Image (spheres, rainbow, N blue to C red):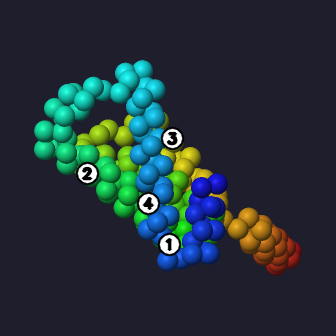
Amino acid sequence: YNFYLIEESMKDNPEQALPITTIQVVVCAVMAVVWAAFDAHGVPDLSHLTSHLADPMFDFALVWLGLVSTAFILVLQTFALGKLPSSETAVVFSSEPLWGAGFASLLLGEKIGANTVFGGSLIIGACVGRVIDIDRVRRQAKVIRYKAHKTLKETLTLER
């Protein structure tokens, strides 16, 4: 439903991609804080958080996750939803776990197991199933059956 709302907003105001993305990022941040507050571990105390912020790798990871993995990707999604129908972009966005598994395997050496292959097959099947025009496939199958029947009939007639 979110894709539909963004698509409609972008149709009405195509120049508003960044403000729309800002709203999405703020909602993500608020939800992350709420989740952290109600998580079984609770919100970490401030001294624990400041000790992590002193670590440059933690800072890099935090900036990467905030700017690249969240904000930049949401900007790209918003622009895409301004150009394509939400039904088509949803198919593309649903392939994200495949990209995550692929990059984890290539860059981090993660093993791809049977569950990953099975889940990936379901995602690919859903994506392919969404774009196949079943009526066209049925028409082509009917033509193939007709031609095969006609060829078989001609072959049987020639043999007599």
Q: Which residue is mark 4?
A: 22
Whichever of callouts 2 and 1 sits on the residue coming sooner in the sequence is 1
Going from the N terminus, do you reach mark 3 or mark 1 first?
1
Earlier sequence position, callout 4 versus callout 2: 4
Residue type at mark 2: give it.
Answer: Val
- State left or right for residue 43 relative to residue 22: left
- Mark closer to the observer (3, 1): 1
Tell me which label, 2 or 3, sits earlier in the chain: 2
Q: Residues within 10 Å of mark 2 (few under 14, many from 20)?
A: few
Residue 155 can be seen, yes or no? no
The reply to whether discs 3 and 1 touch (Cβ–Cβ < 8 Å) is no
Under tag 4, what secondary structure?
Answer: helix
Residue receiving disc 2: 63
Residue that numbered label 3 is attached to: 118
Label 4 is placed on what type of residue?
Thr
**Labels 1 and 4 touching (C-beta < 8 A):** no
In this picture, is 81 found above or below 118?
below
- Going 16% across and 43% down the picture, which residue do you hit? 57
- Look at mark 1 in the image and give the residue it sits on: 16
Residue 71, percent from left and from top:
38, 58
Quadrant (top left/top right/bottom left/bottom right) for the N terminus: bottom right
SS of the residue under disc 3: helix
How dense is the environment of label 4, judged by Cα within 10 Å: few (below 14), some, or many (20 and up)? some
Q: Is residue 37 left or right of residue 6?
A: left
Give the secondary structure at mark 1: helix
